[in-house]
Amino acid sequence: MCICTPVLQFTALPHSNHRVLAYAPVTKEEERSSQKHEMRGTVKLYNTFDEMGLKVIDHAHDRNSSINKFVKARPAYGDGSKTTNSNDTWHATKALARKFKKLASGPKKNHGVTWHGQLQDKGAPLKTHFYWSMKRCAGSIQVLRDSLLNVVEHYQVL
């Protein structure tokens, strides 16, 4: 059973105060293909921002490849700056625990080779560590790298 809403809503919230800047509803009459709704809503929002004279410094979204292309293709603003394209941290880490299972389970003959039983309960904490590392790195690649590598220290058997 598919439950579809008649209007998909896109809202822009600034990081500083989380008040609605713009609202862009997309109806089925406007765009029949539900796969294209996010792109249509994003274009509407950017048109509104351009009319308002607002610069979008960072666009965080759910890893939609069409949105990635759209944001990267947008021309630079008058001062030469461009919108940074970011995949939000929740979407970046959501599959980590599930994918980590490949290292925590497998056929008995490959135990200690491609997987290890001691990693069985580490998927969720690893996801939390990655999420926390992204939140506190303040945009520094080196801080992020060091924090991610530090996870080994947490679980290393001495």
Image: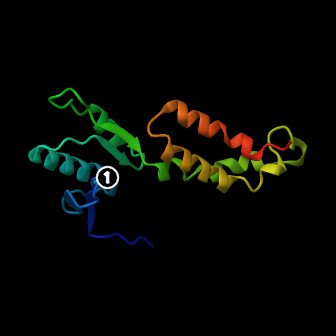
Q: Which amino acid is tagged 1?
A: His
Which residue is painted at 28% across and 48% down in the image? Answer: 39
Q: Does residue 84 sit above or below 120 in this rendering?
A: above
Nearer to me, 107 or 82 = 82
Number of marks: 1
Nearer to me, 3 or 106 = 106
Nearer to me, 12 or 38 = 12
> Quadrant where the N terminus lies?
bottom left
Question: Where in the figure is residue 28, as x and y percent of width and height?
Answer: 24, 63
Left/right placement of residue 80 relative to residue 63 reads left
Question: Where in the figure is residue 101, as x and y percent of width and height?
Answer: 71, 51
Q: Does residue 11 sit above or below 134 in this rendering?
A: below
Q: Does residue 18 sit above or below 73 in this rendering?
A: below
Which residue is painted at 60% across and 34% down in the image? Answer: 146
Instruction: Give the image quarter of residue 80.
Output: top left
Question: Where in the figure is residue 149, as x and y percent of width and height?
Answer: 65, 36
The scheme the figure's colours follow is rainbow
Residue 32 appears in the figure:
no
> Quadrant where the C terminus lies?
top right
Residue 21 appears in the figure:
yes
> In the current view of this chain or complex, which residue is farthest to the top?
80
Instruction: Give the image quarter of residue 84.
Output: top left
Q: Does residue 145 sit above or below 102 in this rendering?
A: above
Question: Where in the figure is residue 120, as x and y percent of width and height?
Answer: 77, 54
Q: Which residue is mark 1?
A: 15
